Structures are given as C-alpha cells and as structure tokens.
Image (cartoon, helix red, strand yellow):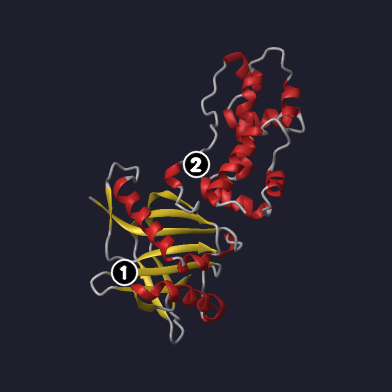
Amino acid sequence: MLRPYNLLEEILIEIENNLNENINIDTLAEKFSLSERHLRRIFNFAFKQTLGDYIRSRKLSASLIDLKKDNANILNIALDYGFDYEQNYIRSFKQEFGITPNDFRRTGNITKEKQPFHLFGENKLSNGNLIFSPDIVMVPQFHVIGKNSRSSFDYIINQAPDAGKQFLFNERKLIKNIINPNIYFGIGKVDIENKYFNYMPSVQVDNLDYVPQGFDQYTFNSSLCAKFRYIGKHHYFAFYTNYDLVNEIINEMYKAVLDNNGENGKYTMSYNKVFFEKINLDDNDGTYCQMEWFTPVEEK
C-alpha cells in the first residue's frame, strides 16, 4: 500500500495520462485497491475538491487543444474524452467555461482553465505522510464532553491512545445530546512550566445541561486558529504511539505558522492555550488516517 504522498501523486499522474481514455473513479479505485468511497474522501480531504469534478474539469481543459483544430468534430471530441453524448459534453463545457465549444472556437477566450494539481515537497513528512500548510480560520464557540487525563510528557504517548479507545468504545455512549457521534475531538493543552499535558477525548454536544457523572466538560471559545490537515498511512490511534511522528508533525505545524503561513508572517502560535484535533471516524478506514488540527494563533 502506497504512502499518502505517493498515493496522491500516482492518482494525479494516472488522471493526466488517461484524460482521453475511460478514466473515472471506478477505474482509479480498482487500480489503487481502495474503495470508491474512501478514494473520494481522501482526495477531497487533500485537495478540497471532489475527485469527480476534478477529472471532469481536467478532461474539459484538455479538450480545448482539440477544439482549436478546425477539422475536429465536436461529437468525436466528446467521445474521446469520455462523454457519452455530444450534448453532455456541450452542457458540461458551458458549465465549466461559461461558453459553448463553438463559441470558444470563434473567440478562443477561456477565463478559468483548470490546471493539474501538484503535490509539493514541503507537504511531505520524512515517512511519506502528508501535512498541509494551514488555513487561518475563525472557529466559533463549541462545547464538548469527555474524559480528561493529565500526564507527564514522558507518558502521554502511551496513555493518549488508550484513553481515546476507552472513550470511543465504552464511555461515549453515556453522553446525551451529541451533535455527531462519529466526530472525535481530542482537546489538549500543554503545561510547559510543570511539564504536563492535559488531554481529553470528547464529542461535541448541543449544550452542557447534562454532564454524566465522572465526565468533564469544556467550552472552546471563538478563536482565530491555524487549521492543519494531515494524512498518514496508519490507524488513527497509532498516531499517538509514534513519538517521532508526533514530534515531526508538531515541529512542522509551528514552522508553518511562524515562517510559511501564506500571510507574510502575520500570525504567531498562541502558547499555553488549548488546541484540538478533529477526526471524522467515517473518513478513516484503518489504512489511511485523516485528521485536522486547530491551534490558536495571534496577529503579531
């Protein structure tokens, strides 16, 4: 099974090499031994666009070269790029570019040709997993209920996955008014002075009117955050057992915010504040882990 960087890179190459062949989600899923559902999810998570829309856009953009040939028949072009009917091609073309194929032939004007996606070296971690540079987002206030644990730095790597499993498989079902039981929140805070780490596996709830006995509650107040996306070739619990991986990701996150956040160094990480990870359990099949990190930032 390919590492995330290599998997996504191979998918992009496969699409580009087969734009005028019968390339689609089914053929890609079969080639890379992934379920169609998971292939869609991992592509959308990485590139923020659906795989089907990307394939269609790239086919339409590639067809522009053929349309410039005066003797090329539009029906044949449509069939060459996998459109069953000429009208399907014309309708998709107009939706993509705002003009018909014949209009393009007359004017040669296209305003938004879709260029192929690329992965860049800065996204790649040493083991082939991926972390994407952050978006700066405003996270609205939300409430969670979970089980808080406090450990020294030396032991948290071993305790965090066990706490997460215990919460997901046994304790989560005791919580009422959950907004989405398949969205897992890991609430964390580093106590640098005392060398402790607080970690709370949790789920988001509508309100804090009912907190089961023995559980903890937390309200994350509206905050400007750096939002990171991560894809790794492992089960999501295995992330916590790999100390080197955790260190590498944290270092990359800090570096991205401080040096390469796309805002000319406008933001800095907020130390000693609560950060959280967010995992959609439906997106994780045990082979490829997808998760998001949110860490508060401040304007310099």
Place of residue 209 in the rendered image (x, y in percent of width and height, measured from the top left): 43, 79
Residue found 66% across the figure and 14% down from its top:
69
- Whether residue 26 sits left or right of residue 237 in the image: it is right
Q: Is residue 258 left or right of residue 135?
A: left
- Residue 188, image x, y percentages: 37, 69
Q: Residues within 10 Å of mark 1 (few under 14, many from 20)?
A: some
The three-letter amino acid code for the residue at tag 1 is Val
Q: Position of residue 274 (x, y in %)?
A: 33, 66
Query: Is residue 227 visible from the viewing direction of this image?
Result: yes
Nearest the camera: 95 or 224? Answer: 224
Q: Residue furthest bottom?
A: 213
- Furthest residue toward top: 70
Q: Give the residue displayed 56% in from the left and 42% down from the top.
A: 9
Tag 1 residue: 190
Q: CA distance from mark 2 to mark 1?
A: 32 Å
Quadrant placement of the N terminus: bottom right
Q: Amino acid at mark 2?
A: Leu
Read off the residue under disc 2.
Answer: 119
Residue at coordinates 56% horizontally, 52% vertically from top-left?
3
Residue 198 percent location from the top left of the image: 35, 74
| Residue 102 in view here | no
Q: Which residue occupies the foreground of this view, 105 or 276? A: 276
Residue 87 lies in quadrant: top right
Label 2: how many residues lie within 10 Å, few (<14), some (14-19) or many (20+)? some
**Element on which disc 2 rests:** loop
Residue at 52% across, 81% down = 171
User: Could you tell whether 275 is left or right of 57 in the image?
Assistant: left
Instruction: Give the structural element (helix, strand or loop) at label 1.
Output: strand
